[in-house]
Amino acid sequence: MDQFIVKPLFGGDAVHWYTPTNATLWMFAALLGIVLLLVVGTRGRAIIPSRIQSISELAYGFVYKMVEDVSGKDGLKYFPYIMTLFLFIVFANFLGLLPMAFTPTSHIAVTATLALAVFIAVTVLGVVKNGVSFLGLFWISSAPLVLRPILALIEVISYFVRPVSHSIRLAGNMMAGHAVIKVFAGFAGVLGLGAIAPILAITAVYALEMLVSFIQAYVFAILTCVYLRDALHPAH
């Protein structure tokens, strides 16, 4: 599990809130990747796009359609935030698959910060947009009257558990995949010339991790869209 240790970049072992670390470096690399993709890659705005402009346009259209389908037309004004979240997680996940790299999204501190930012933002938005009507999110009017208080309690608990599940899902999947690859790599090192099976297993798991890296970014973004929809239209 030493691949998940946060280490200072410049000497010493102590990590303070202001210390540049390997996590800082790879989060900055993810941000740089976003800038290169969306700013540098599309600066020509060619009618016949280059490969990188095509990727940028595909990413833009993919996230835009997702926000529109899940959150509705009202949610499109918050598209830039969701687009930023999606691309940051995608780049952080894929950069973490490089040899000797560090995966920031394998740390609950990073994913919990992202999840709490979403939770606080949609909660404040729901209260500001709807006022007291926001409580309709917890009151299931279609249920029998005797069950409504019980269901309301369940809804309140599930609402405040959202940032926990939102963050643990991403961090857990990224950590598990990297740990499995490291285990098979250890087998390959022990077996030496007979390491064909572990190497094939590493290749298969690595391909699966590439898929998981995208899917987890998609799941995080689409759940954000669901929470945004609930904030904009809280009534059951």
Image (tube, rainbow, N blue to C red):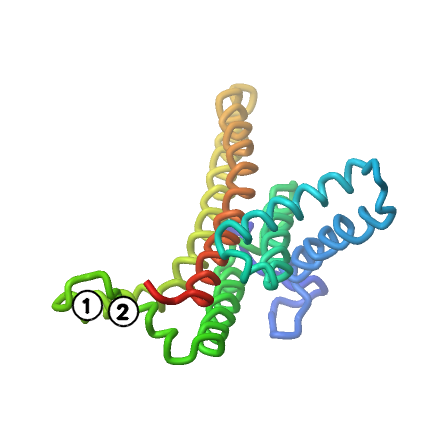
Specify the quadrant of the image occupied by residue 75. bottom right
How far across and how far down the image is residue 184, in percent? 49, 33
Q: Judge by depth and name the residue closer to the eye, 195 or 214.
A: 214
Q: Judge by depth and name the residue closer to the eye, 163 or 15.
A: 163
Q: Count up the numbered dots.
A: 2
**Up-down: is 216 above or below 233?**
above
Q: Are marks 1 and 2 in contact (CB under 8 Å)?
A: yes
- Check disc 1 and report its element: helix, strand or loop: helix
- Check disc 2 and report its element: helix, strand or loop: loop
**Up-down: is 45 above or below 7?**
above
Query: Which of the two labelled residues, at mark 1 and mark 2, occupies the earlier sequence position?
Result: 2
* Residue holding disc 1: 148
Q: Which mark is residue 69?
A: none
Q: Amino acid at mark 1?
A: Arg
Q: Residue at x 52, y 47 (%)?
A: 218
Neighbour tally class for label 2: few under 14, some 14-19, many 20 plus, Cα within 10 Å: many
How far across and how far down the image is residue 169, in percent? 43, 52
Report whether 57 appears left or right of 205. right
Q: Judge by depth and name the residue closer to the eye, 160 or 178.
A: 160
How far across and how far down the image is residue 46, in percent? 85, 42
**Up-down: is 52 above or below 13?**
above
**Up-down: is 197 above or below 59?**
above
Q: Residue at x 67, y 48 (%)?
A: 60
Q: Which mark is residue 139?
A: 2
Specify the quadrant of the image occupied by residue 162. bottom left
Specify the quadrant of the image occupied by residue 56. top right
How far across and how far down the image is residue 77, in percent? 61, 63
Distance from the alpha carbon under mark 1 to that under mark 2? 7 Å
Q: Amino acid at mark 2?
A: Trp
The quadrant of the rendering that contains the C terminus is bottom left
Neighbour tally class for label 1: few under 14, some 14-19, many 20 plus, Cα within 10 Å: some
Report whether 6 appears left or right of 179. right
